[in-house]
Image (tube, rainbow, N blue to C red):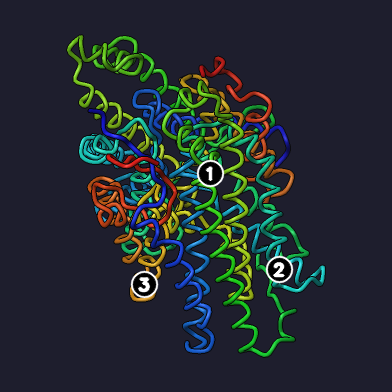
């Protein structure tokens, strides 16, 4: 007798994710009332890390595109916020979504160049683009050329109010990026994207628009990195070309995603938190700290390629968000 | 410096860039992987040479006798112990491992040598020049160019005439068929990486005597090597020399216009080639 087989999207664990995310965001929103300003500033960086890790994972883990040049979008977002706030006179917080859109728009022509390369050469190609952005920025006097610029137009706010607003804006931006990536991955589009990553030829033969799918992800990831760059600029109120366009950001993204688990929704978030805690406690060791990060990343890739989330989720591939389907024996869907 | 001189210097610089590119190209050709720590191994070679010069008192040319075999062995080990384990149909693991390796090398060098500028001193050769008509060509850049041509010619001979070279090409064309014919692909991969690291060592030391270097010089060397590969055309040995010359000339002409534009000019020429002739100036059309 044939057993009925049902296909379910919502499993026990995936029922937990969305409400859990809501609870975490609401709890974090109380931050400015309970946490000291210095820690608030640190948490703004954590939210930026979450955005960076989630968007880099979209590129590498779902789109199969290893970019070493996301700092191009980070720098662009940071400079867009600084320029809009200082020179154009837009409110710094309102400049943030504009900066994300700008980073996304710029990524469209960049994608046409970068997509002529694949694999490792694509990686270095994106890096060259980021270097070109940096070299152009250091020659642009309106934004302070090589020495960068400060955002002073937010000084109308009381310091505590400004910090709280920055914190909430950063939290909201991170929540938008996380929820957006969950919705993207679970959509029909996300399914096509995973197919492209696993086998572009097979995906194309089943009717997936391979190049379009990759381009959409490339542009969205750029917008997300631009948003993160803008948040970092609002947090530090200072942009400097050699730091915002630094390839170090990519190193951080790689570490967060590899540690957490590439190609999962939860992994990059776990990785960002782990990275943040490590940085808070070990960053003063400087070069040694980065050596340890590198060695740990190599060990993870070779020994635990599914990352911390993969180890936690076990062989069942437990997921906190309903992004996949599970076949269930003995139950009709 | 007039324009003609800038172009001539650029041509000579192209030889050095071609050596950097050859290693990257060889590893990609045989294993279809890109080593993102390529430039950092060159910097590592330059620092080992620096220690041999300042600590042991060797002349710069003699450091090659030590640095080249050491890096070749290191290359074999890196391939067999790290990269072989990361090889998969997806380029992701190898890129992640080599990128992390790049971070480790840069920060390791930073710990030992600080972020100061260093240079390998050649003595009289640093300033010696040949006067040809109205032009003055540095003897050292000229020597480097000759070495580059010799390395490329040697590599071409190795790949076409030796048993190992043929095994390498066979593995590149069809790994499984080569295995059936008795080729141990892992050993071939190791030898290819060792060869690539040997060229990287030569390029790192030669470059360290031509311009100053710091622990974080690696990434820009990687980027130059990559630009040369793409400009010259993938999988084309002599294309690397042509690509190197194009990049060298672009950078020097950029510097002639304004010293701050040197690197940017090279990047822009690279992007132009990518936009207009993605198979490279001398490459065949890239297979799908």
- Respond whether the residues carrying marks 3 and 2 are from the same subunit: yes
Nearer to us: label 3 or label 2: 3
Report the chain holding disc 2: A
Where residue B88 sits, quadrant-wise, is top left
Crowding at dot 1, Cα within 10 Å, few <14 / some 14-19 / many 20+, comes out as some
Mark 2 lies on a secondary structure that is helix
Crowding at dot 3, Cα within 10 Å, few <14 / some 14-19 / many 20+, comes out as few
Where residue A253 sits, quadrant-wise, is bottom left
- On residue A82, the disc is 2
Seen at 56% across and 37% down, the residue is A214
Crowding at dot 2, Cα within 10 Å, few <14 / some 14-19 / many 20+, comes out as many
Where residue B204 sits, quadrant-wise, is top left
Q: Position of residue A78 (x, y in %)?
A: 64, 64
- On residue A187, the disc is 1
Q: What residue did someone put label 3 on?
A: A277
Q: Is residue A79 left or right of residue A285?
A: right
Q: Please state, as top left, top right, bottom left or bottom right, where the N terminus of chain B lies in the image.
A: top right
**Which one is nearer the viewer's eye here, B11 or B86?**
B86
Q: Of the two numbered discs 1 and 3 on the same chain, state the one appearing first in sequence.
A: 1
């Amino acid at each position: 007798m044939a057993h009925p087989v049902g296909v379910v999207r919502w499993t026990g664990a995936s029922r937990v994710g969305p409400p859990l995310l809501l609870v975490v965001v609401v709890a974090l929103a109380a931050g400015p009332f309970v946490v000291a300003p210095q820690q608030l500033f640190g948490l703004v960086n954590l939210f930026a890390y979450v955005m960076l890790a989630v968007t880099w994972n979209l590129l590498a883990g779902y789109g199969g595109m290893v970019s070493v040049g996301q700092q191009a979008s980070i720098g662009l977002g940071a400079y867009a916020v600084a320029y809009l706030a200082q020179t154009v006179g837009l409110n710094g917080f309102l400049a943030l979504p504009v900066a994300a859109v700008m980073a996304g728009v710029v990524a469209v022509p960049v994608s046409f160049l970068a997509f002529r390369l694949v694999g490792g050469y694509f990686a270095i190609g994106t890096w060259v683009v980021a270097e070109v952005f940096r070299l152009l920025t250091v020659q642009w006097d309106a934004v302070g050329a090589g020495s960068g610029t400060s955002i002073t137009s937010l000084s109308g706010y009381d310091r505590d109010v400004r910090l709280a607003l920055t914190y909430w804006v950063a939290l909201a931006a991170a929540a938008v990026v996380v929820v957006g990536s969950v919705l993207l991955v679970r959509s029909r589009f996300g399914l096509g994207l995973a197919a492209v990553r696993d086998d572009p030829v097979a995906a194309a033969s089943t009717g997936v628009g391979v190049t379009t799918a990759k381009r959409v992800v490339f542009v969205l990831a750029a917008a997300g990195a631009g948003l993160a760059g803008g948040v970092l600029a609002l947090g530090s109120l200072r942009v400097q070309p050699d730091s915002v366009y630094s390839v170090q950001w990519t190193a951080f993204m790689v570490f967060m995603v590899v540690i957490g688990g590439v190609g999962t929704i939860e992994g990059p978030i776990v990785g960002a938190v782990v990275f943040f805690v490590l940085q808070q406690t070990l960053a003063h060791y400087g070069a040694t700290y980065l050596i340890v990060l590198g060695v740990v990343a190599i060990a993870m890739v070779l020994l635990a390629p599914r990352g911390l989330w993969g180890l936690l989720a076990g062989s069942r591939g437990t997921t906190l968000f309903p992004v996949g389907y599970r076949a269930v024996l003995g139950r009709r869907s | 410096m007039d324009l003609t001189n800038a172009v001539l210097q650029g041509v000579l610089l192209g030889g050095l860039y071609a050596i950097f590119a050859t290693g990257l190209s060889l590893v990609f050709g045989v294993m279809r992987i890109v080593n993102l720590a390529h430039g950092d191994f060159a910097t590592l070679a330059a620092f080992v040479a620096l220690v041999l010069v300042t600590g042991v008192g060797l002349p710069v040319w003699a450091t090659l006798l030590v640095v080249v075999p050491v890096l070749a062995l290191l290359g074999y080990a890196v391939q067999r112990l790290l990269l072989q384990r990361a090889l998969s149909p997806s380029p992701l693991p190898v890129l992640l491992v080599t990128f992390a390796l790049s971070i480790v090398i840069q920060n390791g060098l930073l710990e030992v040598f600080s972020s100061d500028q260093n240079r390998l001193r050649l003595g009289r050769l640093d300033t010696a020049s040949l006067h040809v008509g109205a032009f003055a060509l540095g003897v050292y850049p000229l020597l480097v160019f000759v070495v580059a041509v010799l390395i490329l010619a040697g590599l071409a001979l190795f790949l076409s005439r030796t048993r190992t070279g043929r095994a390498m090409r066979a593995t590149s064309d069809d790994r499984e068929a080569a295995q059936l014919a008795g080729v141990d692909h892992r050993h071939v991969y190791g030898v290819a990486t060792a060869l690539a690291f040997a060229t990287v060592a030569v390029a790192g030391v030669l470059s360290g005597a031509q311009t100053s270097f710091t622990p974080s010089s690696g990434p820009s060397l990687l980027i130059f090597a990559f630009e040369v590969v793409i400009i010259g055309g993938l999988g084309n040995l002599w294309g690397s020399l042509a690509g190197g010359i194009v990049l060298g000339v672009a950078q020097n002409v950029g510097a002639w216009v304004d010293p701050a534009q040197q690197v940017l000019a090279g990047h822009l020429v690279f992007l132009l080639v990518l936009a207009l002739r993605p198979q490279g100036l001398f490459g065949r059309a890239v297979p799908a």
